[in-house]
Amino acid sequence: MKTFLSVLAQHQAVLAQLANSSHEIEEAGMLLINTLKQGGKILLCGNGGSAADCQHIAAEFVVRYEKKRQALAAIALTTDTSILTASANDFNFDSIFSRQVEALGNANDCLIAISTSGRSANVIAAAKAAKSKGMIVIGMTGNEDSELSQLASMTIKVPSNITARIQEAHIVIGHWWCGVVEDIFSQEALDARKDA
């Protein structure tokens, strides 16, 4: 049995290695800021724990992360049970996110596509649908090269092959994105009030 300290050490080692991806993580944050500044929205998709991360991140964009500010446009494609079950039933499970991207996505939007393996067929289908609409796709995966990492406009690869460690890193990255986006929009609102 693994001890808690051994799991904690594993977690800390993975997070420390994220420093090697700081440029990509920060660049993706700028893509999200630009998407929202241009009136676009952020769509998110993933399965299982990654689906929960989509909802978590979307909630913090729409409601707030740490500061009171305007609501920011983000939609987790994992939440509408009628759409998800109709799409899976009438077509197939692989279409549950791509169908929503076709319906809701526009060229000035961004898709955050989360798959720890990078091989989730429904997430890959969503990335393909987003690319066909001219959307930016930010992939979030584990360490391995994958179809998702090749399809995405940019991919954040967490340096681990352990699903739990990858998901823990994904939410740390998602929280940083929420914070940096929130800082920009909070400061702009403050500057606008000063100029009024």
Image: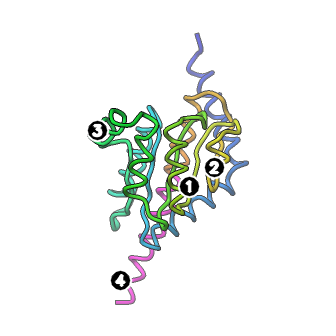
Give SS at disc 4: helix
**Rendering coords of residue 12 (x, y %):** 63, 34
Q: Quadrant of the C terminus?
A: bottom left
Q: Which residues are magenta?
A: 176-196
Residue 80: in magenta span: no
Which residue in the protein does label 4 denote?
Answer: 193
Which residue in the protein does label 3 denote?
Answer: 81
Q: CA distance from mark 4 to mark 3?
A: 41 Å
Asked if the residues shown at circle 1 and circle 3 are in contact, with their CB atoms under 8 angstroms apart, the answer is no
Q: What residue is shown at x 56% (from left), y 57% (from top)?
A: 131
Q: Earlier in the sequence, mark 2 or mark 4?
A: 2
Residue kind at label 1, given as amino acid type:
Val
Q: CA distance from mark 1 to mark 3?
A: 24 Å
Asked if the residues shown at circle 1 and circle 2 are in contact, with their CB atoms under 8 angstroms apart, the answer is yes
Give SS at disc 2: helix
Which residue in the protein does label 2 denote?
Answer: 151
Left or right of 111 on screen, residue 70: left
Asked if the residues shown at circle 4 and circle 3 are in contact, with their CB atoms under 8 angstroms apart, the answer is no
Residue 195: in magenta span: yes
Q: Which marked residue is nearer to the observer: mark 1 or mark 2?
A: 2
**Rendering coords of residue 127 (x, y %):** 54, 49
